[in-house]
Image (spheres, rainbow, N blue to C red):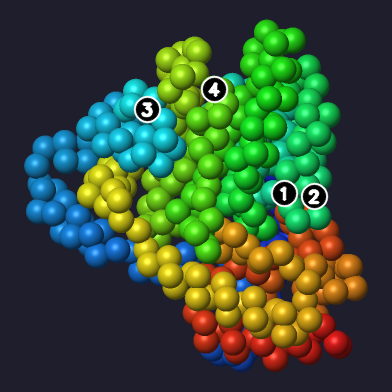
Amino acid sequence: MSLLSSEISEALGKGSWIRRIFEQGAEMKKIYGEDNVYDFSLGNPDLPSPGVVGECLAELAARATEPFAFGYMPNAGYPHVREALAAQVAQEQEAPVTGADLLLSCGAAGGINAFFRAVLTQGDEVICPRPYFVEYGFYVGNHGGKLVTVPTQPDFDLDVPALLAAITPRTRVVLLNSPNNPTGVIYSEKTIWALAHGLTAENAKREKPILLLADEPYRFLTYDGARVPSIMNIYAYTVVVSSFSKNLSLAGERIGYVALAPQMPGKEELMAGVVFANRILGYVNAPAIGQAILLKALGQQVDASVYAERRDAMAKVLSDAGYEFVMPAGAFYFFPKAPGGDDVAFVEKLCKERVLAVPGSGFGMPGHFRLTFCVGTKVILGAAEGFKKAIVG
Ligand code: PLP
């Protein structure tokens, strides 16, 4: 007998192979020792947060006895933090975003859920290129929507005609993530323009325009001078979601934001809806401590050069072993082809070599596997032998 809803019970069953990797990994670490298992499975940022985070916490500790130091606040977040963050987002997005265009959320995940709760009606569709961050399916489903995934090009760039062809009268949102998890691809300005043109033409035929949700927690992390274009600047119905989980290594503190394109018609009502949804989903407001940290740390980030070095080390290990992959332009993932084509079987082979990876099936794209470089270069180099053995064995 299960006490669960059939939907959650089914979801737990489907995710069981991901759990198996984690459980197998934990078991292997016990047997072989932490240093002898090469774990590339989890995207948990391992770089230390900038020093300013600790300074901020010390200041907060000194103020902790003041009344309302951590009291309820407006559901959208502290107004002065929204204002200060808006100035930074305006710079990043090259668009005149103000505090009123912005909600502080419980990470990007909380922001995405508040947004979907505000805009989706039962049966509405959200189009997303695949491979994709696996949680999207759940986030859309949480609010009665359906995730419709569309293949990308061989280099993982958007297939704009395919995305546009997937539009139906129920399409409410197109969801993009750039730099991308799991591929590391960055969509070019030209590609975004092509998509925006298509969506604008589509909007002329419908009552409610299609919203473009840009999930950008990896905007700060690009390589070889690559630039992430501002989608907000290109398409008026853009909503940007981001967080400080990766750029400040604050993933456990749950702090992020939702920002609306300043030129969006109807943005005041949309923002009121997202703020309300954030409240009734039980997030209430973003954490007070996270807001204080982000305010103090604005403009700072972890040392991204460390990720760049690891990317190069990983690329060398993979090419030396003969893997086929697209070099990531941003974020901290590789998404190589699984030799032999069966990603689940290949990940098991890697596991035998004490190398932990996640099959592409988990991202809606079998035939590949994902490696995260949230681990030191020593681990990457240590895994070289295992990568070589798995490919020939
Ligand atoms: N979106 C993408 C593409 C991610 O990779 C992640 C986390 O890994 C999230 C959203 C959620 O991040 P947050 O910790 O800000 O909720």
Given the image, on which type of amino acid does mark 3 rest? Answer: Pro
Q: Residue at x 53, y 64 (%)?
A: 224
- What whole-number distance in Å separates the C-alpha atoms at marks 4 and 1? 22 Å
Dot 3 alpha-carbon crowd within 10 angstroms: few under 14, some 14 to 19, many 20 or more: some
Dot 4 alpha-carbon crowd within 10 angstroms: few under 14, some 14 to 19, many 20 or more: many
Quick one: label 4 or label 1, which is nearer the N terminus? 1
The residue identified by callout 3 is 96
Q: Point out the image quarter for the C terminus.
A: bottom right
Q: Nearer the viewer, residue 113 or 318?
A: 318
Residue 285 versus residue 35 in the image, above or below = above
Residue 122 versus residue 46 in the image, above or below = above
- What whole-number distance in Å separates the C-alpha atoms at marks 3 and 1? 28 Å
The residue identified by callout 2 is 153
Question: Which label belongs to residue 157?
Answer: 1
Quick one: label 3 or label 4, which is nearer the N terminus? 3
Quick one: label 2 or label 4, which is nearer the N terminus? 2
Quick one: label 3 or label 1, which is nearer the N terminus? 3
Dot 1 alpha-carbon crowd within 10 angstroms: few under 14, some 14 to 19, many 20 or more: some
| Residue 26, position as x, y percentages in the image | 60, 77
Query: Do the numbered discs 2 and 1 sit on residues whose CB atoms are within 8 Å?
Result: yes
Question: Which label belongs to residue 236?
Answer: 4
Q: Residue at x 80, y 67 (%)?
A: 337
Q: Nearer the viewer, residue 28 or 86?
A: 86
Given the image, on which type of amino acid does mark 2 rest? Answer: Gln
Instruction: From the viewer's perspective, tell me whether residue 291 is left or right of residue 241.
Output: left
Quick one: label 2 or label 3, which is nearer the N terminus? 3
Badge 3 element = loop
- What whole-number distance in Å separates the C-alpha atoms at marks 2 and 4? 26 Å
